[in-house]
């Protein structure tokens, strides 16, 4: 089961934070644990306080998050003429550079192996939020993050890269962000790999030609997407697999590899999240990546 490893901000920020501490943090993260740093938070500017106005029009009502995406080169989830757009963008831009500094300090990353990708601001209450706009009912479960899952994205194949997400609860009303953290990735994969369909010949090329993926999907991504959906639809897994709840208080940061840590977000609003990617060859233990664990399980090269 994934552990929540606590490092108080006072220790993380002190002069005694050492190379050994950094090496330990890498071990914990690559071992599919969550690092939790209470007391660490991005500073908010006065003109960003309007983001806590509880106005239902803060997001576009279609997407659950406001996203700044360097690949797509735009902000989504908020309307172009929203009075909140400038504040949300300046906060997200600052959060991104703040998390780059935190990550370098936490892990020691002289080679800059971790590449910052999307930034999200998550103002909307998660509790009871089963649906987002647009998609049909039969697909709603995919977007329901109150169900345990490991991250996998339809349009954004990971191939040899991994997803590390850094969260910050900036809730000004004292409300925690309530998570569930689950069990071992290989046990999760074993439940479903034998039952999922094989990819069709040429499937990944066709999906990419139709622009249903941003670049070509790998067999690894195919398996991850199927695990994601099969796990979310499996009531027994959701209710009875190993799991623990944890409430991340305001003014706290936590991070984990969300492609191998089983997680669900049950309640909370006003969080920031920064996604980083790292190539599995740049990990200290590539054998602990979901790519390699799945290759071991299936006996095939997958990416
Ligand atoms: O919003 C959250 O707290 C976590 C949601 C989630 O599943 C994710 O960001 O991967
Ligand atoms: Fe997730």
Image (spheres, rainbow, N blue to C red):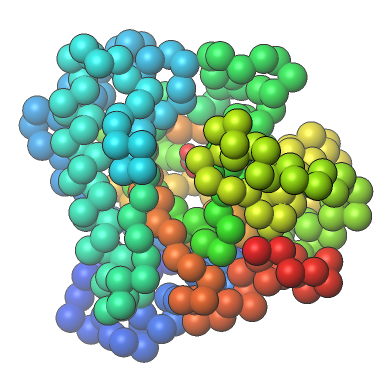
Return the residue found at the far right. 195
Q: Quadrant of the N terminus?
A: bottom right
The answer to whether any part of residue 245 appears in the image is no
**Hey, which quadrant is residue 302 in on the image?**
bottom right
Q: Residue furthest bottom?
A: 20
In the rendered image of this protein, does residue 52 appear above or below residue 15? above
Question: Is 132 located above or below residue 41 in the figure?
Answer: above
Q: Residue at x 41, y 83 (%)?
A: 23
Count of all numbered marks drawn on residues in the image: 0
Q: Nearer the viewer, residue 240 or 166?
A: 166
Residue 298, image x and y in percent? 83, 66
Residue 221, percent across and down? 66, 51
Q: Residue at x 21, y 55 (%)?
A: 98
Seen in the image, is 3 located left or right of residue 6?
right
Residue at the spot 54% in from the left edge and 19% down from the top edge: 132
Can residue 156 be spotted in the picture?
Answer: yes
Could you say where residue 287 lies in the image, as x and y percent from the top left? 64, 78
For residue 109, side relative to residue 216 (left or right): left
Horizontal arrangement in the rendering, residue 200 relative to residue 220 (left or right):
right
Q: Name which quarter of the figure residue 237 lies in.
A: top right
Residue at image point 67% right, 38% down: 206
Q: With 79 as the anchor, is 280 left or right in this view? A: right
Viewer-side residue, 28 vs 134: 134
Q: x, y (%) of residue 200?
A: 82, 44
When the figure is inspected, residue 111 is found, relative to residue 59, above or below; the finding is below
145 or 67: nearer the viewer:
67
Along the viewing direction, whichever of 111 and 169 lies nearer the viewer: 111
**The C terminus sits in image quarter:** bottom right
Q: Is residue 37 above or below residue 203?
A: below
């Amino acid at each position: 089961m994934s552990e929540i490893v606590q490092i108080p901000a006072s220790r993380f920020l002190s002069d005694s934070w050492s190379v050994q501490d950094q090496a330990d943090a890498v071990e914990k993260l690559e071992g599919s644990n969550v690092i939790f740093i209470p007391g660490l938070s991005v500073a908010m500017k006065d003109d960003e306080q309007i983001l806590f106005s509880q106005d239902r029009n803060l997001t576009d009502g279609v997407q659950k998050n406001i996203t700044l995406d360097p690949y797509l080169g735009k902000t989504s989830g908020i309307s172009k003429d929203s009075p909140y757009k400038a504040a949300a963008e300046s906060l997200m831009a600052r959060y991104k550079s703040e998390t780059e500094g935190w990550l370098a300090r936490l892990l020691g990353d002289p080679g800059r192996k971790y590449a910052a990708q999307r930034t999200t601001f998550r103002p909307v209450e998660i509790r009871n939020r089963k649906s987002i706009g647009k998609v049909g009912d039969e697909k709603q479960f995919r977007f329901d993050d109150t169900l345990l899952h490991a991250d996998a994205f339809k349009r954004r194949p990971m191939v040899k890269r991994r997803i590390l997400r850094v969260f910050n609860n900036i809730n000004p009303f004292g409300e925690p962000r309530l998570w569930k953290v689950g069990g071992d990735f290989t046990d999760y994969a074993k439940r479903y790999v034998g039952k999922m369909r094989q990819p069709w010949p040429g499937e990944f090329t066709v999906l990419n030609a139709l622009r249903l993926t941003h670049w070509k999907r790998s067999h690894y991504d195919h398996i991850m997407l199927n695990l994601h959906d099969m796990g979310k639809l499996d009531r027994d897994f959701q209710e009875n697999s190993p799991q623990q709840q944890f409430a991340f208080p305001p003014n706290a940061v936590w991070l984990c590899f969300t492609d191998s840590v089983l997680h669900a977000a049950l309640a909370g609003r006003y969080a920031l999240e920064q996604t980083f990617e790292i190539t599995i060859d740049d990990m200290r233990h590539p054998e602990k990546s979901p790519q390699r664990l799945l290759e071991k399980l299936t006996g095939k090269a997958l990416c």
